[in-house]
Image (cartoon, rainbow, N blue to C red):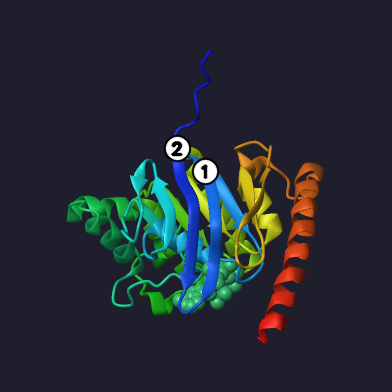
Amino acid sequence: MTTSLPPAGLSVRHLHKIYPPDIVALYDVNLELPLGEFTAIIGPSGCGKTTLLKIAAGIETYQQGAVAFAGEAIAGNPSWKRSVIYQDVRLFPWLSAQANIAFALESKGIPKAEAQQQAREWIVRQGLEAYADAYPAELSGGTRQKIGVCRVLASQPDLVLCDEPFSALDWNARESLQHDLLHYWYEQRKSVLFVTHNVEEAVYLAQRVVLMSARPGVIKEIVDVPLPDERWTVRRDSPQLLDIARYVNNHIADEVRKAQLLEQELGY
Ligand SMILES: Nc1ncnc2c1ncn2[C@@H]1O[C@H](COP(=O)(O)OP(=O)(O)OP(=O)(O)O)[C@@H](O)[C@H]1O
């Protein structure tokens, strides 16, 4: 009898990353994520989470190892198929909210009229009609971030890389954007890799949570989150969710202590 493996998504093998002259950011990192999975990464500050995201996006290189997405090698080669949502999205200040989304679609090769149409649909779907023609400087931080998230999701990347995208937002904006991302993932089944410092957020969103050690970052453990894919139906105070969050929190507390000791040793 043969067992079929899930299709390969992000594959990271024996990855080493050293920043000059000798900062070992990642040490022999191995990670295999099935295509279409929503994965969160959590670990103490400085353990290499952002470095791993940048390498997966193709905007950072590495010294040793192999990284691929859906079988395509990634070694410092960015692609619109792999997009990053940063904590502070940078919209083009000279373009309106809607034009920012349309621009991303045009850059992907979608004809202008079609790009405008799709950008409008995103604006309407998110209930942002009142802000469509506003410029970034005229928008609140939460609305700017929302437009930035729309800009990435509208171009339908196969791998959405999120670097603490909601951490600077107030609770309402954060919850609303979490649900937008969850719905995108649920409907499109694209792969999402989500870096956060917030354990509850990681457990609420992801199907699996990758726990990283203090620097040099290695993968310590991968925790399954056996909750329904329709995650917005799950109460944030459900006992199962809180149990998993407690488990992850304990791990992080240990690794944060190690990271603090390392900082003391290095005299930071
Ligand atoms: N361009 C760089 N040059 C030199 N060192 C760097 C560079 N970028 C990151 N580092 C170092 O590499 C290590 C990993 O950094 P990285 O930003 O990937 O960690 P992180 O886990 O994302 O941290 P945080 O949670 O604080 O954002 C840190 O010690 C950091 O100081």
Q: Position of residue 154 (x, y in %)?
A: 36, 52
Circle 2 residue: 8
Query: Contact, CB < 8 Å: mark 1 with mark 2?
Result: yes
Depth check: 51 or 27 in front?
Answer: 27
Quadrant holding the C terminus? bottom right
Amino acid carrying label 2: it is Ala
Residue 261 picture quarter: bottom right
Q: Position of residue 194 (x, y in %)?
A: 54, 55
Depth check: 4 or 103 in front?
Answer: 4
The reply to whether residue 169 is visible in this rendering is: no
| Ligand 1 neighbours mark 1 (CB distance < 8 Å) | no
**Mark 2 Cα shell of 10 Å, populated few (<14), some (14-19), many (≥20):** some
86 relative to 152 in the view: left or right: right
213 relative to 52 in the view: left or right: right
- The residue lying at 60 percent from left, 37 percent from top is 229
- Residue 133, placed above or below residue 39: below
The reply to whether residue 118 is visible in this rendering is: yes
Q: Which mark is residue 72?
A: none
Q: Which mark is residue 32?
A: 1
Q: Position of residue 260 (x, y in %)?
A: 73, 76
Amino acid carrying label 1: it is Glu
Depth check: 142 or 64 in front?
Answer: 64
**Mark 1 Cα shell of 10 Å, populated few (<14), some (14-19), many (≥20):** some
- Residue 220, placed above or below residue 268: above
Label tally: 2
Dot 1: what SS? strand
Q: How much space separates mark 1 and mark 2, taking CA atoms?
A: 7 Å
- The residue lying at 40 percent from left, 79 percent from top is 137
Dot 2: what SS? strand
